Image (spheres, rainbow, N blue to C red):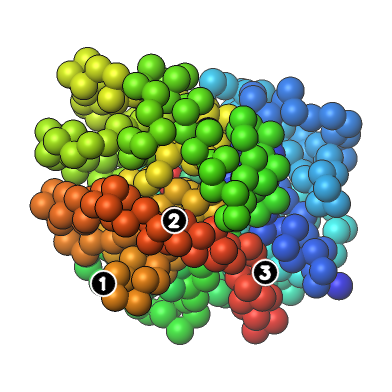
Amino acid sequence: MKHILFVASESLPFVKTGGLADVVGSLPQALTSKYRVSVFIPLYLNVIPKLVDAKPVVTFMVSTPCIQQQATILKQTHEGIDFYFLQHQGYFEREGLYGFPDDGERFSFFNLACVTFIEKMNLHIDIVHSHDWHAGMIPLLSRVVYKHHPNHKNLKHVFTIHNLAYQGQFPLSVGKECLGLGDQILNDGSIRFDDGVNFLKSALVYAHKITTVSPSYAQEILGLAFGERLHEVLRLRQYDLFGILNGIDTDFWDPSKDPFIPYHYDSESLENKVKNKLVLQKKCGLKVSENTLLLGVVSRLTWQKGIHLILDQMSDIMGLDVQLVVLGSGEGHLEHGFRNMVEKYYGRVAYVAGYNEPFAHEIYAGCDILLMPSLFEPCGLSQMIAMRYGTLPLVREVGGLKDSVSPYNSAANTGTGFSFREFSVTDLYHVLRMSVYLYYHYPSEFEQTQRNAMNEDFSWALSSEQYAKVYESL
Ligand code: ADP
């Protein structure tokens, strides 16, 4: 059985800030029938309380001109998957994961420690599957710097782009001093970007195969509009680039047994879904009303998610007979915008800042429609989770949203949600008005669409087969 090492900055059930953690936490499980999979992540401060019986397996020095630090690797097995945690108090035991002035140094250490770990431990790894920029230097370090080391000589590298917008760009000194790279690599154009180094670009150049998280996004990033200035590099690699739609953990996200929601239900008992709405309305200070359409948002509040479209169109949206509950934090002006809306539309709009897993489940269960008007969306998981909970996603037709939501078709009475194409407030509003009309005037069609959504297969079964094909092609 081949041994695959996943390397990422986040993984459920230990640490999560976004969809990356869902994928790294659930894809390995779906691969276990064919492969042995292990996972390598940093030991962040908030991971420590979640360790149960983690034991140190190896300690070594990472030495480059600016890093002379000891790395300790702890191991804990979780549901049959071996997790390896990189422990370093100074770099990782902090409040928060990213956005520190020394991120270049911290993640250089992470990449260097991972390749050294592979070298020191005889785990017979065949494939390293790295995720996002945080692990972007691993293919280069393994294939160039460590290429003569026995455990690296035959290693193959797969790299997955979860979001091309985050690239890990740092000054040249990070490449030279922190990673200890020589002038030739620093100057041959493979990792250089503007005046510095780019972790994600390095992975695009040095990985054997590249994947991203939906077929549409795999196409979109080859062009100027979505390519985040790396489209030329991606085009060079387009025959090694595969778009594979993410799945979700359908065991964790299951309205028939979700421990975070008050009333369990399935596609044949939607009357219990409504009971969740009543609890949610009460909890959020909204007017409790079974028959009022409840809109939801569960998202990082960033420009990428198109949240400002909702705020810009708020007076028209609230002109419809709807309520809105928003969960998430991010850019100050968006948070501020929703706080204002709570005051302005008292009893009709609720806003909860922060990251709150149980409350997210209650929103997915209690709402009728989830808004996700993203500017771009590599895959998106929230819309899939919403569909699983019979909450119809209203999305922009982009990236993974386009690949996972089939728009309601009134003639054929098919579809699993609603969608619009142009990134504009008018198009968002137009489709929202249509879906609100459907809810109030054609409830049986709305319910049929909910059932269609709940009966879609969002498990990893199909996608893990596609990953297996990529691994086998190496
Ligand atoms: P991204 O990774 O770009 O943030 P995705 O839709 O791929 O977006 O994944 C988002 C994941 O994070 C989903 O599981 C969603 O439920 C969860 N999530 C987003 N914001 C919050 C929040 N404020 N509280 C709890 N969960 C959240």
Is residue 232 found left or right of 277 in the rendered image? left
- Image position of 80 with respect to 361: above or below: below
Q: Which quadrant holds residue 1?
A: bottom right
Q: Name the residue under label 1.
A: 223
Residue at left offset 55%, top offset 65%: 456
Residue at left offset 38%, top offset 61%: 445
Residue at left offset 29%, top offset 75%: 411
Is residue 136 found left or right of 128 in the rendered image? left
Q: Which quadrant holds residue 285?
A: top left
Q: Where is residue 142 in the image (x, y as percent from the top left)?
A: 64, 62
Tell me the SS state at disc 2. helix
Q: Nearer the viewer, mark 2 or mark 1?
A: 2
Tell me the SS state at disc 1. loop
Q: Can residue 378 be seen in this view?
A: no
Q: Mark 2 points at which residue?
A: 447
- Image position of 96 with respect to 16: above or below: above
Q: Which of marks 3 and 2 is nearer the N terminus?
A: 2
